[in-house]
Amino acid sequence: MPRILVVEDEPLINQAVSDRLRAEGYDVRSAASGPEAVAAAATYAPDAIVLDIMLPGFDGIEVCRRVQAVRPVPVLMLTARDDESDILIGLGVGADDYVTKPFRMRELVARVTALLRRVERARELAASPTAPKTVGALVIDPATRRITVHDTEIHLTPLEFDLLAALAAAPGTVLTRERLLQEVWGWADAYGTRTVDSHIKGLRAKIGTDRIRTVHGVGYAVEAVQ
C-alpha cells in the first residue's frame, strides 16, 4: 500500500485530503508544519508527499529542499497563489507538480496516482537502461540518470531528467504538451499543460535556453547545440 504524507496547516483541508486518499487505498500520515513534515518524512519514508507551500515553522519549499537532500521523493505542491516565481522555485528544489487552491479532490487524487506511476515507470526503465544519448554537447545517460553538457554534470530533478529524456529521444522533433503529459507525467488529459511550461523554464535555466526550442501553440523540441 503506497504511503502518502499530507502536509497542510489548515485542519479541514488536511483532513479532507487525507480521508480521500485513504478512501482510494493509500496509507496516509499527516503533518501541519515545516519541522513536523521533515521529521515525518524521515520516520515514515513516504512514497509521495502532498505539500502545502505556506506552512508554520518554515515553508513547503524548505521542506522539499530538506527532504530531497536525504531521499528523492515525488512531491505534489499545493499553493494558494498562482505565483510563477514560487512555482519555479518549488520545482527547482525537487517538486514534481503543483495544484493551485481551490482544487478538485478528484484532480488531486489523479495527480498523486500519476506521480506514483511515473516513479514506477522510471524504476522499470532503470532496470533495462539503454545506451547514452548524445544531442550536440548534451549527453543523457539513462543507466546513471546523469546529464552532462561539455562534460560538466548538470543536476536535474528526477522529473526534469524524464522530461529531457523524452524530448531527446527524437532530437529536432516537436512534441506537443499533451504528448509530454502522457509520456512523462502519465496524464490522460491536457489540464496540466502549464505544468509542462513551468518545468521547461526550469530545465532551460540549467542546460541553456537555446537547447530547447519552443513552437508556439504546439510544443517543444530539443536541438543539437554545441
Image: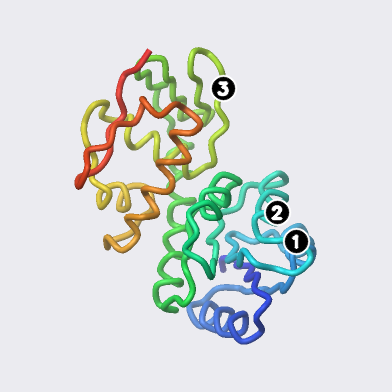
Residue at 47% x, 66% y is 99
Determine which quarter of the picture holds residue 50: bottom right
Tell me the kind of residue under disc 2.
Glu
Tell me the residue that label 2 is attached to: 62
Exactly how many numbered labels are in the figure? 3
- Judge whether 123 appears above or below 27 on screen: above
Quadrant of the snapshot with the N terminus: bottom right
Residue at 66% x, 84% y is 11
Q: Counting other residues with Cα less than 10 Å from the Cα at mark 3, is it few (<14), some (14-19), or many (20 or more)?
A: few
- Judge whether 194 appears above or below 159 on screen: below
Tell me the kind of residue under disc 3.
Glu
Image x and y of residue 54, in percent: 65, 67
Q: Mark 1 near mark 3, Cβ–Cβ under 8 Å?
A: no
Residue at 61% x, 46% y is 93
Q: Secondary structure at mark 1?
A: loop
Nearest to N terminus: mark 1 or mark 3: 1
Using the image as rendered, state which of residue 5 and residue 35 is in the foreground.
Answer: 35
- Indicate how the structure is coloured in the image: rainbow
Determine which quarter of the picture holds residue 131: top left
The mark lying in front, picked from 1 and 3, is 1
Tell me the kind of residue under disc 1.
Phe
Tell me the residue that label 1 is attached to: 58
Image x and y of residue 9, in percent: 68, 76
The mark lying in front, picked from 3 and 2, is 2
Tell me the residue that label 3 is attached to: 153
Using the image as rendered, state which of residue 84 and residue 23 is in the foreground.
Answer: 84
Q: Counting other residues with Cα less than 10 Å from the Cα at mark 2, is it few (<14), some (14-19), or many (20 or more)?
A: some
Nearest to N terminus: mark 3 or mark 2: 2
Image x and y of residue 84, in percent: 48, 54
